[in-house]
Image (cartoon, grey):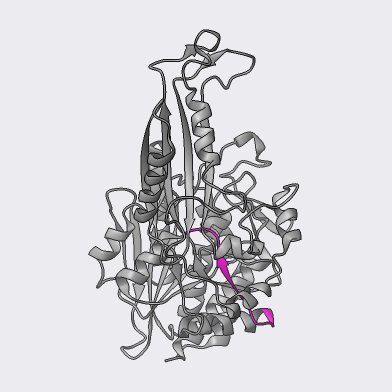
Amino acid sequence: MPNREQALAFAHENRARFLEDLKAICAIPSISTSAEYKDEVRRAAEWVAAHMQKIGLENVSVMDTPGHPVVYGEWLHAGADAPTVLVYGHYDVQPADPLDLWETPPFEPTVRGERIYARGATDMKGQVMASLDAAEAVLRSGGAPVNLKFFIEGEEEVGSLHLGKFIADHKDLLSCDVALNPDTGMLAPDIPTITYALRGLAYFELKVYGPKSDLHSGVFGGVVHNPAQVICELIAGMHDADGRVTLPGFYDKVLPLEEAERAELARLPMTEAFYLEKSGAPALWGEKGYTPVERTGARPTLEINGLYSGFIGEGAKTVLPAYAMAKISCRLVPNQDPADVEGQVRAYLEANAPKTVTWELKSFPGAPASLSRIDSAGVQALAKAQETVWGKRPVFKREGGSVPVVGDIQNILGVDVVNTGFALPDDHLHAPNESLHLPTWYKGIEALTHFFFEIGSRD
């Protein structure tokens, strides 16, 4: 019979080996955004598969997709009456640029103090390994109290382009009672956190064209409309003076925040001072009438992620540029559809772009927002597990980021998704010197071990 205390003792006694395994996977530069690293991405998939087999998972397979592979493994011996938990993760990572800002090489995992530094340490190889470590601890304790399925993808950092189809094509293989997504984080080492909502994403590239080539600004300035000026004016008009997005119909489907939920969000220690300290900005900005924590989790946004036009090198070159480009992202909340938002962007441009230029809008794969029930068996099992480890009830938060697979699991498999993770705000994910706080990580392994036992004892 599964033994919880034995599993927890195994997890504690094997911390050193768990850390060495984490170093091994973090040493593989599985950068999914670049074709140059395609072989390294597959090497990471094969490493994960080998590790799954080593810890006792069965029917392990590296399953090809049109992009990078998905790794699958299972343990289904808890019985037909036991719940089945599907665990999601990704083994791919962001590029490490700029390399000169790293204190130690990004793919040479280094422990300094209480942290391990490496690209992917917190996003999300550390979270994947915590889940596998907890599964191993449970399996070594006489067998798991739940049936386990793991699927770990290699394309999350490029938008999980093929994962929705993979889930639909393998619906029976991935069938489960509850799904666990450990790709979120905590507010602080002493604040256990459960994320019950994730924002969706719509992403665009806007190009504005003027003359057929760059022109001399002295000869043609004042006669030919400058595409750089036009794109700046268009972008500036996408928000009003109260910080609201001006795209037609943008807020039509946005669900209002109930007072009870606003009160729960107000419990979070994410005040204006928190955002000022973490961002280093001189002052905050945003939609009028909402607190910072509401703006970043429960309200939709439109952001400019990049701008380019004309001469941007050192010194002076007096050109009137032929075109200008902007990268635009919208974080979406439940009920908003990325396809609808694309139509809203186009309607705004058609109404506001002058006839002195032409424009084109490219849309990238988007993702809907997701919302999980706080009172579900999975969320309550995780809450009990975190309370056991940290000695306090977790806080519940909405996450400003997007994890496309969560919506796919909810919509295709029809199950609740429990979002957790042990990344911290100062882990520098996606940035130089990415790191993982090891004491929090070890507690996370214990919490996930408890979770498997807690969910196994609930209806």
With respect to residue 165, does 318 lie above or below? Answer: above
Residue at (40, 36) in percent of width and height: 36
Residue at (55, 82) in percent of width and height: 450
Q: Where is residue 346 in the image (x, y as percent from the top left)?
A: 37, 44
Quarter residue 277 falls in: bottom right
In the picture, measured across the screen, residue 225 lies left or right of residue 53, that is: right
Q: Reply yes or no: does residue 391 show up in magenta.
A: yes
Residue 332 vs residue 434, the one in the foreground: 332
With respect to residue 98, does 289 lie above or below? Answer: below
Give the total number of marks visible in the rendering.
Answer: 0
Residue at (23, 63) in percent of width and height: 169
Residue 84 vs residue 12, the one in the foreground: 84
With respect to residue 443, does 229 lie above or below? Answer: above
In the picture, measured across the screen, residue 74 lies left or right of residue 104, that is: left
Residue at (35, 72) in percent of width and height: 74
Q: Reply yes or no: does residue 39 show up in magenta.
A: no
Residue 64 vs residue 229, the one in the foreground: 229
Regarding residue 372, the answer to whether it shows in the image is yes
Q: Position of residue 187 (x, y in %)?
A: 66, 66
Q: Give the range drawn in magenta.
A: 390-402
Residue 308 vs residue 454, the one in the foreground: 308
Q: Position of residue 172 (x, y in %)?
A: 24, 73
Q: Position of residue 418 (x, y in %)?
A: 47, 74
Regarding residue 13, the answer to whether it shows in the image is no
Quarter residue 261 falls in: bottom right
